[in-house]
Amino acid sequence: MARPREFDEETVLDAAVQCFWSRGYEATSVRDLIEKTGITAASLYNAFGDKRALYQKALDHYVEGSITARIRRCGGLAPREAIADFFAEILSRSLDDRDRKGCMLVNAALDIAPHDPDFRTIVAGVLARIEGFFLDCIEAGQADGSIAPSLPPTSLARHLLGVLMGVRLLARVRPERDLLEGIVATAFTLLDRTDKKDMIE
């Protein structure tokens, strides 16, 4: 009969997220994880497997508690308001990030995804969900008139995804309010423009 766990899994995953998030996958040792989570090496391996498996669980935990939760919160708003609130949260998190940890998903895209096909698929899947959220909002906004129909919804959604990634990356080295807010504000002009000729010029 299996022994019951002597720790709370969510608490351990929260600690693992903080460890991986602040140091990155490669720089985080098993010793770091043991110290941060407060569980023994045996418990860690028995519950989560190796470091890579724990990183995947930690990344999933981060995505669920941060990105998925944000999409869920914003998804109940009017289309343009949903996009605005999404980016308002991103700006707030980026500007309040004193340790400059950035976004764990973006960090994973740079840190481990290029060398690990499985993680590349995981990260790409989450980015596709974010793009899908933008796309749904834009299509609904163009339908109700709150977002201009000047550009195809897919193009706008992909542009917003690029803006999001850029803001999160820039914030790690240049967490300047004017810079980050200006990037987002400029992107939002594309939601309002109705004259294609003006956009080309």
Image (spheres, rainbow, N blue to C red):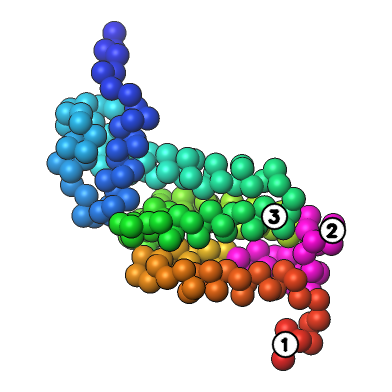
Magenta stretch prevailing secondary structure: helix
Query: In this figure, what is the number of numbered marks?
Result: 3
Secondary structure of residue under mark 2: helix
Q: At which x and y percent is residue 105?
A: 43, 54
Q: Residues within 10 Å of mark 3 (few under 14, many from 20)?
A: some
Q: CA distance from mark 2 to mark 1?
A: 23 Å
Q: Are marks 1 and 3 in contact (CB under 8 Å)?
A: no
68 w.r.t. 8: above or below = below
Looking at the image, the residue that sits furthest to the left is 31
Q: Of the two numbered discs 2 and 1 on the same chain, state the one appearing first in sequence.
A: 2
Secondary structure of residue under mark 3: helix
Query: Which residue position holds label 3?
Result: 81
Kindly identify the amino acid type of the residue bearing the numbered disc 3.
Glu
Q: Residue at x 55, y 74 (%)?
A: 182
Q: Read off the magenta span.
A: 140-160
Q: Are marks 2 and 3 in contact (CB under 8 Å)?
A: no
**Camera-side mark, 1 or 3:** 3
Looking at the image, the residue that sits furthest to the top is 1
Kindly identify the amino acid type of the residue bearing the numbered disc 2.
Ala
Q: Of the two numbered discs 1 and 3 on the same chain, state the one appearing first in sequence.
A: 3
Q: Residue at x 18, y 43 (%)?
A: 32
Kindly identify the amino acid type of the residue bearing the numbered disc 1.
Ile
